[in-house]
Image (cartoon, rainbow, N blue to C red):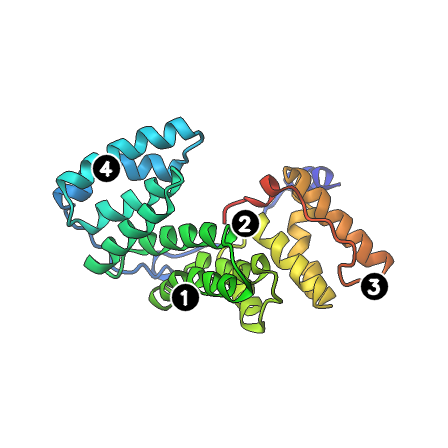
């Protein structure tokens, strides 16, 4: 159907166009700064980390490189932030937290340091032993770096996502503030299908059916969405058959399908 509509449109003798004059584009100030020696030295490590580390061997190798640079530039916050990411990727949570704390102490604007500390604390909270009070304290600690980052950068989606996730993974009902944060995260990263799936599922559980339909629609209609698209379509079909459905028996999609970019 879409292909026929496109062929029909392209076959027209005239095509609609919108002229955008240069003065209509508001471009903010552009600034550049020279990199300090340490930040310049660690840049290949940062690029490698952001591209992704796909094996324990790769993580260990990159960590050796990051630690060598950190030994040479122990007071560079960018170096310590990159080191925190490498320590986390290698499974060293305590070391990741220490490096992140070092980066933040030297430069409180190091956003990635908050993220890596939060990741490490999340992993520790997931494995936390003890009674409910101890586990609640671990999850509260895991939320803290993301709350701090949200205060620093209110338009960063990750703190909003992980604030919500902290309640879910703790086994607690997300607060209204956590739901609102997840909605805002989707507004900031509408391309993230995994995030849409998470929000859509949360809205279904809250009985916000029409909102869930709007959120899940792009996932269900994504031709390259794989299992995530299949899951979204099945949810929408269930909502059509049972208008009052609030997620009873909902099966989560495979974890790998929800890693769309969060």
Q: CA distance from mark 2 to mark 4?
A: 33 Å
Q: Which residue is mark 3?
A: 243
Q: CA distance from mark 3 to mark 4?
A: 56 Å
Question: Label 3's element?
Answer: loop
Q: Position of residue 196 (x, y in %)?
A: 60, 54
- Answer whether labels 2 and 3 touch (C-beta < 8 Å): no
Q: CA distance from mark 1 to mark 3?
A: 36 Å
Q: Position of residue 75 (x, y in %)?
A: 15, 50
Q: Which residue is mark 4?
A: 67
Left or right: 2 with respect to 142?
A: right
Question: Is 80 above or below relative to 132?
Answer: above
Q: CA distance from mark 1 to mark 4?
A: 28 Å
Mark earlier in primary sequence (3, 4):
4
Mark earlier in primary sequence (1, 4):
4
Query: Which marked residue is nearer to the observer: mark 2 or mark 1?
Result: 1
Which quadrant holds residue 186? bottom right
Mark earlier in primary sequence (2, 3):
2
Q: Residue 154 or 24: which is nearer the viewer?
A: 154
Q: Which residue is mark 2?
A: 192
| Outermost front residue | 130
């Amino acid at each position: 159907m879409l292909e026929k509509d496109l062929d029909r449109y392209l076959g027209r003798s005239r095509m609609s166009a919108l002229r955008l004059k240069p003065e209509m584009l508001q471009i903010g100030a552009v600034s550049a700064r020279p990199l300090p020696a340490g930040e310049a030295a660690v840049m290949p490590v940062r690029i490698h980390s952001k591209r992704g580390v796909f094996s324990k061997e790769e993580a260990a190798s990159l960590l050796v490189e990051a630690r060598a640079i950190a030994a040479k530039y122990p007071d560079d916050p960018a170096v310590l932030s990159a080191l925190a990411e490498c320590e986390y990727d290698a499974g060293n949570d305590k070391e990741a937290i220490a490096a992140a704390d070092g980066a933040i102490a030297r430069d409180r604007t190091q956003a990635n340091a908050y993220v890596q500390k939060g990741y490490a604390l999340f992993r520790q909270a997931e494995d936390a032993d003890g009674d409910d009070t101890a586990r609640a304290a671990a999850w509260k600690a895991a939320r803290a770096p993301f709350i701090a980052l949200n205060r620093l950068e209110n338009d960063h989606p990750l703190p909003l996502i992980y604030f919500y996730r902290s309640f879910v993974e703790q086994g607690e009902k997300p607060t209204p503030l956590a739901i609102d944060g997840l909605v805002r995260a989707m507004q900031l990263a509408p391309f993230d299908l995994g995030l849409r799936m998470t929000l859509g599922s949360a809205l279904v559980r809250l009985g916000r059916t029409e909102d869930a339909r709007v959120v899940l629609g792009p996932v269900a209609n994504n031709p390259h969405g794989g299992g995530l698209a299949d899951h979204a379509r099945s949810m929408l079909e269930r909502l059509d058959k049972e208008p009052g459905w609030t997620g009873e028996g909902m099966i989560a999609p495979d974890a790998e399908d929800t890693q769309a970019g969060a």
